[in-house]
Amino acid sequence: EPHYLGTETQIGTVLFGHGGSGFMVSHKAMRMASEHRANHADEYIRFTESQWAGDMVLGKLLSDAGVQLNFSWPLLQNAKLGEIEPLTNRFYRQPWCFPVVGYHHLDPPDVERMWRFDQEWFIDVRI
């Protein structure tokens, strides 16, 4: 099946999966996008040259090929753990009520701190 999952972001009229948060595209969706691009190569070359956000260009191509974005926020976060805005609690999905698959811009020390927290939390809870 064609699947495109990502944290919803918009530039102009194009809704797409935020690349920094990561996104997932199924084989079928990529095949559809590839075939669509092959049939409209000149159009996408010009469009790509005029844009700065590659994730947006891919999102437009997928949409044009008939593959719609399935929203994944807050499973895929567009922020670091300590940078999640309290304002997001007013959104239709509250971030603290969902598991997180990935965060944006984590460096190796951040990943290590999160891993240690996770390990220590499970030890503390089992006591």
Image (cartoon, rainbow, N blue to C red):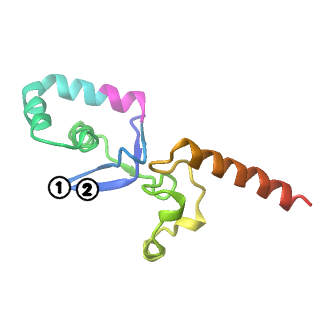
Residue extending furthest right?
A: 127
The magenta stretch spans residue 24: no
Which residue is label 1 attached to?
13
Give, as a three-letter code, the residue at label 1: Thr
Look at the image and give the residue range highlighted in magenta: 25-31
Structural distance between the alpha carbons of marks 2 and 1: 7 Å
The residue positioned 14% from the left and 24% from the top of the image is 39
The magenta stretch spans residue 28: yes
Quadrant position of the N terminus in the picture: top left
Relative to residue 120, is residue 51 depicted above or below? Answer: above
Which labelled disc corresponds to residue 10?
A: 2
Q: Residue 117 lies in what quarter of the image?
A: bottom right
The residue positioned 10% from the left and 37% from the top of the image is 47
The residue positioned 45% from the left and 53% from the top of the image is 72
Secondary element under disc 1, as helix, strand or loop, is loop
Q: Tell me whether the residue at label 2 lies in contact with that at label 1, contact meaning CB atoms closer than 8 angstroms.
A: yes
Secondary element under disc 2, as helix, strand or loop, is strand
What percent of the width, then of the height, locates residue 16? 29, 49
What percent of the width, then of the height, locates residue 81? 54, 59
Left or right: residue 47 compared with residue 112: left
For the image, the number of numbered tags is: 2
Left or right: residue 105 compared with residue 120: left
